Image (cartoon, grey):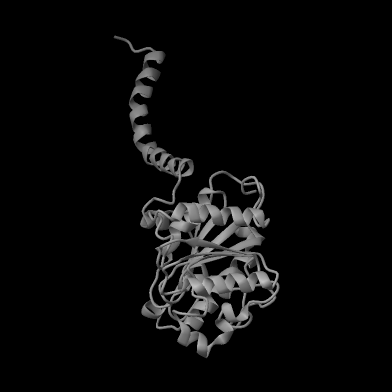
Amino acid sequence: MKMTRRNKLTMMKTLIAPLAFLLLAPLVMRAGKAEDLDRRSTYLLPVAELTNRAEQVVYKKTSQEDLRLYLLRPPGRPMRPLPAIVYFTGGGWVNGTPDGMIANAAWFRDHGLIGIAADYRVKNRHGTTPLECVKDGKSAIRYIRARAIELGVDPNRIIAAGGSAGGHVAAATVLAGNDEAGEDAAVSSRANALVLHNPALGVGFGSDFFADHPDCSPLANVCAGWPPTVLSCGTLDRTTPYEAAEQFAQKMRLAGNACELVTVAEAGHSCDWPATNVNFQPTLERMLEFLRVQGVLAKQGVK
């Protein structure tokens, strides 16, 4: 039978279609995976998956290791720079990896911020002291502010956050001194707000370090001009005592600073961590509302 031009075209389409699907299938699957990430809460995903999905940026080169930021961006293409929250994990300045509190960063990402987990040097991985932790925290905030345009970040809405020793690292971004040599001091390392989970403040855990380095103690250096700060602490915390959190909040308010203490009753250290902790969601919702009330974030959603 003589094959017409139409029959030839039909046969070609029949043969090409399966090949096209095979070639495009990986792209379709990848796009579907990204779309799924955009449509649902991500903070309960495995931390390894969140870390792998994150955009990685080297913010500091050290003799031990290049230090990275892990950025989780909210869905869509924003028309303006977004606020960012930078989480420093706990671990006593000794342990800890950037995925330690990436779920917290993802929770805020799900609420419209750029969620960032920042690596910093710790003793077991880098042979360093808490002083290097403080320097790295300040370097991370300074890097983000200096490159805010290319990162899509609002340089006036950078929030430093962390738990336990990571909470101290976040709070220390506000303190004077202990800047890394060679960095541009004209770019401020001060966060515009602080979100602290059972932070080391200068009493209890780390008291020997703070005795030797009082300039690194948030509790000893509260003064007028601190940024809006919200912190959580368990009433049964024996590592970073609840009494220290109460004292810090009181000193902040007496100095004229906005500060709220989220009390987690009958909870010990890591009172609202990890993401599966029953206190995780209500605590972060309180913290988000505090940031909105203080004008760090927009009242109706994050804009």
**Residue 265 picture quarter:** bottom left
Residue 244 image point, x, y percent: 52, 75
Residue 86 image point, x, y percent: 54, 63
Q: Is residue 274 left or right of residue 230?
A: left
Q: Residue furthest bottom?
A: 212
Could you tell me which residue is drawn at 44 percent across and 51 percent down? Answer: 43
Could you tell me which residue is drawn at 63 percent across and 74 percent down? Answer: 251
- Front-most of 30 and 14? 30
Residue 258 image point, x, y percent: 66, 64
Could you tell me which residue is drawn at 41 percent across and 14 percent down? Answer: 6
- Front-most of 85 and 21? 85
Q: Is residue 28 left or right of residue 255?
A: left
* Residue 111 higher or lower than 270, as above or below: above
Q: Is residue 225 left or right of residue 219?
A: right
Could you tell me which residue is drawn at 46 percent across and 52 percent down? Answer: 281
Residue 279 image point, x, y percent: 43, 55
* Residue 190 higher or lower than 32, as above or below: below
**Residue 97 picture quarter:** bottom left
| Res. 82 visible in picture | no
